[in-house]
Image: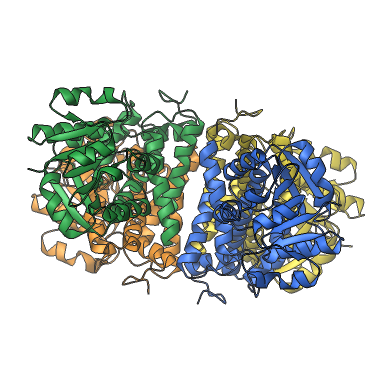
Chain colours: A blue, B yellow, C orange, D green
């Protein structure tokens, strides 16, 4: 069994390591703040002192960080992942970053004799815990085949999408609909509510209708009550919208509903609500409609 | 068992009558062109010479017509439904029209001693044939209770939403998401495709993702191949978008993604594609992106 | 000199009559509330008891009312303008209504042996008082030629645009830019302000820049201080936007910035600010940006 | 009289140097391709071999380059402007780049004992040649005062806006309206044209209306005939829109009409029309409306 490494032990990354440990894998892990890693060390994870140390100790290294800047931070420098990776190893990056950035790092990884794929996942922590996460992979097919058995221990659905960067493009193509669907849902709820239907009934009907995607089913009720902790906050959602819009400009694809929805994420921040789940788009539109919510007074 | 009447025997209306006949109901039906009714007469439907005749012969009358103008045409005048309806009867209007128009007719029906509800359905002909159609009802609760057993013979899910017009408001609140979700889906497919992923793979991934609503699951593949006959064409979809926008203006609810998407339905007509299923929004965006499709050359 | 009639003596209509009287014309006028006409009667205007009476007493009748419904109210019925108009007379309608509605009335006017043109004006009360108003005319060219000398006493620029309804189409085509330019101006002011420039400086620079249309020059400062009385309030502006969007749908012209801006007029109403000049779009955007204004607290 | 330097001798930069020479200034100039500088050398400009050489030879150095990357290219490295600048000198950057990037270079310039301002201009080459260009300045006020007499030889209107970066913010705040106003203008022209008014008449009326900003007056006729050479092409315009949207996200200002219009610049590129003046947005909308133009067939 390959020795695994994992850089970035936040909510999602931590749960992935937990899952890999429970499947019997040996995992060396690193996180910028060690404190968040304690519970995993107790479960048997080996602590690595740096991304370099993790890469040096592992056959397959995963990373799960916030954005392109965070990825650069763990890749480069004397303690970076690139300094520790070598011939025959695989770097599987789960972070959602720009496809161009990812391709740039793949080239650098190959200069070291190793290989890299982009392997973003679709779904939330809950999807992961339920064992239903899906993983998309972009890179060389032979690397994908070597990696696949390990990825199947993260989630049951592993899809090869094509060359490096394409799994990221596909992920971005999915994620733009998250915000747009949430926005259209909010428009519908407020139309129903101001017509005289209770918000609860409107949510009930919409989350059981032809437009009830899995995302709408779980996030729709957030317009009644935000979760205690944001599942995917305004800034995280906007990061993906910006990746989509950058890609759209680069590839000459107009994105009218993506850009219209994105302005409401900006407005959420303008109104001081950026720490909420991005379902708070509803509250922005409610405010503009003169409707009170738990958040919009 | 109540004697039923049905005005408007187009694709959807005709299949509803077929279903009611198969459940053993007696149905008197009328359609502007009798020819479309022949197959139902062969199955036992009684022909009524006018909306008035249908209303006179029935305890419960249904109507399923295209828009407010068509509804006015069957309601008013010497041969109209209002001329035939009388004490104790129920008019259940399945058409998608403006809530205000519907409330106006409800008042006139009540002047005749009868009662009216708006009872729009959510779902396509296929949903109906599979016996999965859901019906929403707006009107007096006691009328709803009397009507409910008959509605259950049309579809298995019958929901009381509130006063007259509210089922229409709810339907409109659902339908605006149809066009918006289709638009966001198109943006995603084109981003993926211009990244280098095949259109087929992009559709496959998106229709199995967190944003795959039932509508996206069945209509998403239309971007690969339009159906032989439009399920819901550009003009029908735009009619509902306009109902949403009228309601939004009336109730002071801004509808940013609804209005952004609606412009692409207008563009579809500008490009001469109005007879296609509204999934042709994809082809409009493809044209703007310099991508060829079966429709956009 | 032709005897003139004028129906609708609101702010704009009243000032036009005042101007016509000062040029030596004989004017018979009518307004729904006579009180608003007193100052003009003092200046020599003859009071007419109804639109019919005004039409009967005049060679050329003008009307200036709020919308299609108000136009129908003065045209139809036993006391309506149509009942008083006859052979050889001209009806010059200054109201901004839908081109289709206007064409419908033109046909009815012709049945009476008279003729009608649509003659909307571009500019505000101040433009009128400064003698700079421009008038566009749609209708038969010979009628335009007969009417032109009188129109030149209203404003110095009289343009023949084409057949009936076309002056209205042209007016609508101008007016949609009012709201869109105001919206873009607001976006610019807020960007500058949150960058650290004072709102006053931002307005000063923008109102002297390449994007400073006459409208931006006079309305731009409203974001510093709303006028005591709205020049053109939210609902009036939205009425014209809706005329544009209806025309766009009818003629298959997508209107992306018109529809995006229109949603902010709806939002202004949702926030309770509909009585302000439509420059209050700025305050809506300010609220969404977390910026305080005299209106957005 | 201060010795002047100028880096970047494209259309605009070259004409500025020409103007400065004609006012009697000594100017040392550099351009990536020397060929474009020949006509200026003939007029008395001294050739500098690198940005460093220009900075070393001058008291006041101007730069006019395309974007942040081009600015970095002339600033950094052994031959860069930073290597040649020293105590008491002023760097006045006319380029339109991000305020953040500009502030970064200002800090580096100060480390050398010199000072930097951002001094973007508003207006076209023609405005410059007519001697009507306006210049906005961001930076220390005392540096502005020293620089002002020289700037007045470029254009007659020189405005101090505030700290470093603020002139750029103000410029961006102006420029977003360029694209939005052009888009709304296009919507208006097409509404008029499909109503039955000729495109020429529509342009004539709109360019003399309340919405006729200077930009609309000179660029409006481009929808009849694109200029032989783009005044400001699709990509240049989009660069400024992206600066606006980046700033909007950074400062939490939603930009609904900016982002809606920007998608039409992307579409222009998707349709292969990126080398045209950005007025080609009209042709994109014309295509979507089924209207032919010289460009949209």
Q: Disc count in the image?
A: 0
Q: Position of residue D287 (x, y in %)?
A: 48, 31
Is C150 displayed left or right of C264 in the figure? Answer: left
Let me know if residue D235 appears in the view. yes
The residue shown at (64%, 38%) is A111
Let me know if residue B115 appears in the view. no
Q: Position of residue B5 (x, y in %)?
A: 79, 54
- Quarter of the image for the C terminus of chain B: give it: top right
- Depth check: give the residue in front, A124 or A266: A124
- Quarter of the image for the N terminus of chain B: give it: bottom right
- Depth check: give the residue in front, A247 or A88: A88
Q: Where is C14 relative to D200, above or below?
A: below
Is B194 displayed left or right of C71 in the figure? Answer: right
- Depth check: give the residue in front, C28 or B68: B68
User: Which quadrant of the figure has residue D31?
Assistant: top left
- Depth check: give the residue in front, D139 or D214: D139
Q: Position of residue C182 (x, y in %)?
A: 33, 54
Is D139 displayed left or right of B61 in the figure? Answer: left
User: Which quadrant of the figure has residue B244?
Assistant: bottom right
Is C20 displayed left or right of D245 in the figure? Answer: left
Q: Where is C32 relative to A246, above or below?
A: below
Q: Position of residue C38 (x, y in %)?
A: 17, 67
Q: Where is C100 relative to C224, above or below?
A: above
The residue shown at (90%, 46%) is B44
């Amino acid at each position: 069994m390959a020795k695994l490494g994992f850089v970035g032990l936040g909510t999602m990354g931590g749960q992935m390591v937990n899952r890999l440990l429970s499947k019997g894998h040996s995992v060396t892990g690193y996180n910028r703040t060690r404190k968040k890693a304690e519970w995993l060390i107790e479960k048997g994870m080996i602590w690595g002192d740096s991304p370099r140390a993790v890469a040096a100790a592992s056959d397959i290294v995963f990373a799960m960080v916030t954005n392109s800047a965070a990825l650069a931070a763990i890749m480069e420098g004397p303690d970076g992942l690139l300094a520790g990776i070598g011939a025959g190893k695989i770097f599987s990056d789960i972070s959602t970053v720009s496809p161009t950035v990812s391709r740039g790092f793949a080239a650098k990884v190959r200069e070291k004799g190793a290989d890299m794929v982009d392997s973003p996942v679709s779904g939330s922590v809950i999807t992961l815990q339920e064992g239903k996460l899906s993983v998309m992979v972009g890179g060389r097919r032979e690397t994908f085949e070597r990696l696949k058995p390990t990825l199947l221990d993260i989630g049951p659905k592993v899809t090869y999408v094509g060359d490096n960067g394409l799994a990221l493009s596909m992920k971005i193509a999915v994620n733009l609909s998250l915000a747009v669907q949430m926005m259209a849902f909010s428009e519908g709820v407020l139309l129903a509510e101001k017509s005289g239907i209770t918000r609860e009934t409107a949510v009930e009907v919409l989350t059981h209708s032809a437009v009830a995607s899995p995302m709408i089913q779980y996030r729709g009720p957030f317009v009644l009550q935000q979760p205690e902790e944001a599942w995917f906050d305004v800034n995280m959602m906007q990061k993906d919208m910006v990746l989509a819009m950058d890609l759209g400009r680069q590839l000459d694809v107009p994105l009218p509903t993506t850009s219209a929805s994105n302005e409401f994420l900006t407005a959420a921040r303008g109104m001081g609500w950026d720490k909420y789940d991005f379902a708070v788009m509803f509250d922005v539109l409610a405010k503009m409609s003169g409707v009170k919510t738990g958040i919009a007074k």
